């Protein structure tokens, strides 16, 4: 609501010059996971248009695109040495934490957006951890920062401040890479258009990542017919073993 | 060439999977063990989630052991009577093991438990096997012909009640230690994703005095049956059996096992046992080090599922 109110206020303020509108598209609305899936790269295109036709837009504009994957409950654990053995001794849970989070922008975030705007929209990956942490204070902060670091290492989180390129004054393009072990489910690409560090337009576009064909069939079978699936696995194992025994029999 | 594993939800190199399946299969054929105790840690180390690794390796162990068990069966190297008792007992153990597995996952101490169990179990079995094998080798070097253990030779176990005659093994022993061994193997196997051959073979040899010509065949049959039961149980409870992962490992494993079995003919029994002991000890030390050495990253993360964190 806050964001909407802000956008509305800005739109009203800017109305004499002409309000901006965002038109955007993701290169694939449905990322399909097949047997040879090894990650995917999606392109995000968009243009900034005048709300009322004929009004010339005055830039320069900046764009931030936030791609968020399906939410999961995660836990970050800390190993410490206890009695000579390294073991998990402390943990913080993160409820409804994005499984994928990528921030692309056309410039350094602090140079293109007001800090209050960044904070309000929880744009930074660390903000996402703060929102999801089930522990407040220093401990939550620390585990959150470590979780973001681990997610970044595995390619699930990224912050690319050179990730959006302007093709013209008002058209931009960005690319986001999904790792091969990307979570299945709905994704959202949320785009913010900024002018003079202020939000002037925004929009969201969803896309989905899901298994298809044989991969989907196996996944569904394991979930819906676990007994049958288990028996098929057993038959496959025994059959393979028997076949190898016959093939190599001298 | 990458292949996407639908249950593990990640893609891995097909040749890597077949390769490690084959390498472990070779060793399993050589020593007459399933090879799960090598394969499960290898997969976890390669990034496969622990529950998927533990559940899917059962398929590879079952397949690799099937061809071995069949060839022993043709040669008459299986005591079916003894195997039946072991299988029944291990089924009960496997049920308890699968249940305990979910509990530990929820508590977040699965890593520690797996590392500790591997260390203790493998360290203990490896040391015993090594000591025995070295003694046997030294004795042979000195030219002392070791007397075959006679079935009539008694241990404390022969004093237990409910004795049963196992004709093929030329044994007349109490059924209680047989069942106890079965339950233990089933429990450990389901929990750690191992067939348990490396425990079962020494247990049959040293505790029950099963003669050498039926030990490996009987152990293999027991491993096949138990792994099949565990696979179905895992498919039912944790739904983490990845059939594609299991199949890739099986293909490599069964082929590797054939070569291992032929290579095994060129080695004496005590040499084989010494080599297996070395391997078992190496894995134990590897797990011991992860417990003692400072981890490269003290922080780790996991996804929480309905059953707990993986």
Image (cartoon, helix red, strand yellow):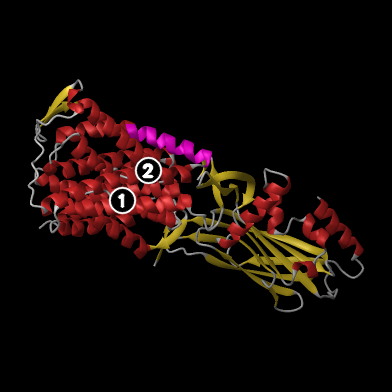
Circle 2 Cα neighbour tier, 10 Å, few/some/many (<14 / 14–19 / ≥20): some
Classify residue B200 by image quadrant: top left
Q: Residue at x 31, y 48 (%)?
A: B59
Residue B105 on the magenta segment: yes
Residue B298 in the image, given as x and y percentages of width and height: 56, 53
In depth, the one of A79 and A68 nearer the eye is A79
Q: Is residue A105 left or right of residue B65?
A: right
What separation in Å lies between label 1 and label 2 (alpha carbons)? 11 Å
Q: Is residue A193 left or right of residue A27?
A: right
- Is residue B110 visible in the rendered image? The answer is yes
Residue B135 in the image, given as x and y percentages of width and height: 18, 48
Q: Which mark is residue B120?
A: 2
Q: Which mark is residue B280?
A: 1
Q: Residue at x 79, y 55 (%)?
A: A120
Judging from the image, mark 2 belongs to the subunit labelled B
Q: Which residues are magenta?
A: B93-108
Q: Secondary structure at mark 2?
A: helix
Q: Secondary structure at mark 1?
A: helix
């Amino acid at each position: 609501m806050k964001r909407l109110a802000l956008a509305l206020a800005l739109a009203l303020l800017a109305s004499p010059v002409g309000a901006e509108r965002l038109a955007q598209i993701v290169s694939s609305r449905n990322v399909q996971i097949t047997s040879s899936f090894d990650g995917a790269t999606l392109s995000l295109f968009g243009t900034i248009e005048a709300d009322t036709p004929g009004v010339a837009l005055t830039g320069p504009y900046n764009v931030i695109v936030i791609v968020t994957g399906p939410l999961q409950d995660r836990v970050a654990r800390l190993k410490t040495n206890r009695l000579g053995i390294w073991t998990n001794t402390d943990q913080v849970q993160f409820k409804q934490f994005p499984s994928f989070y990528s921030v692309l922008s056309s410039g350094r975030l602090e140079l293109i957006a007001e800090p209050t705007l960044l904070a309000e929209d929880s744009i930074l990956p660390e903000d996402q951890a703060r929102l999801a942490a089930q522990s407040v204070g220093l401990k939550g902060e620390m585990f959150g920062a470590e979780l973001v670091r681990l997610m970044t290492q595995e390619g699930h989180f990224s912050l690319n401040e050179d990730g959006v390129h302007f093709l013209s004054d008002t058209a931009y393009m960005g690319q986001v890479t999904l790792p091969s072990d990307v979570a299945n489910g709905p994704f959202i690409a949320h785009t913010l258009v900024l002018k003079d560090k202020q939000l002037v337009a925004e929009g969201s576009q969803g896309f989905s990542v899901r298994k298809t064909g044989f991969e989907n069939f196996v996944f569904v079978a394991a979930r819906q017919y676990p007994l049958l699936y288990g028996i098929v696995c057993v038959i496959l194992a025994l059959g393979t073993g028997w076949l190898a025994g016959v093939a190599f029999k001298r | 060439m990458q292949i996407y594993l639908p249950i593990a939800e990640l893609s891995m190199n097909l040749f890597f999977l077949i390769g490690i399946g084959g390498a472990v299969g070779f060793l399993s054929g050589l020593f007459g063990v399933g090879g799960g105790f090598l394969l499960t840690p290898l997969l976890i180390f390669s990034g496969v989630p622990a529950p998927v690794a533990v559940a899917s390796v059962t398929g590879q162990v079952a397949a690799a052991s099937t061809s071995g068990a069949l060839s022993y069966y043709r040669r008459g190297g299986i005591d079916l009577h003894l195997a039946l008792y072991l299988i029944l007992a291990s089924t009960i153990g496997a049920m308890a093991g699968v249940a305990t597995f979910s509990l530990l996952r929820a508590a977040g101490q699965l890593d520690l438990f797996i590392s500790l169990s591997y260390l203790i179990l493998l360290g203990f079995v490896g040391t015993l096997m090594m000591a025995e094998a070295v003694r046997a080798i030294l004795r042979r070097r000195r030219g002392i012909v070791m007397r075959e253990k006679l079935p009539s030779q008694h241990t404390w176990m022969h004093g237990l009640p409910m004795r049963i005659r196992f004709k093929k093994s030329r044994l007349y022993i109490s059924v209680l230690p047989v069942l106890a061994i079965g339950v233990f193997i089933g429990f450990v196997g389901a929990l750690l994703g191992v067939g348990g051959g490396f425990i079962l073979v020494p247990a049959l040899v040293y505790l029950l005095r099963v003669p050498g010509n039926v030990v490996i065949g009987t152990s293999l049959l027991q491993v096949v049956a138990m792994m099949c039961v565990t696979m179905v149980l895992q498919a039912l409870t944790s739904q983490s059996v990845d059939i594609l992962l299991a199949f890739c490992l099986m293909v490599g494993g069964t082929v590797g096992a054939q070569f291992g079995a032929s290579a095994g003919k060129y080695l004496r029994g005590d040499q084989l046992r010494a080599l297996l002991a070395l391997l078992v000890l190496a894995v134990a030390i590897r797990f011991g080090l992860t417990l003692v050495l400072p981890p490269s990253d003290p922080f780790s993360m996991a996804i929480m599922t309905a059953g707990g964190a993986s």
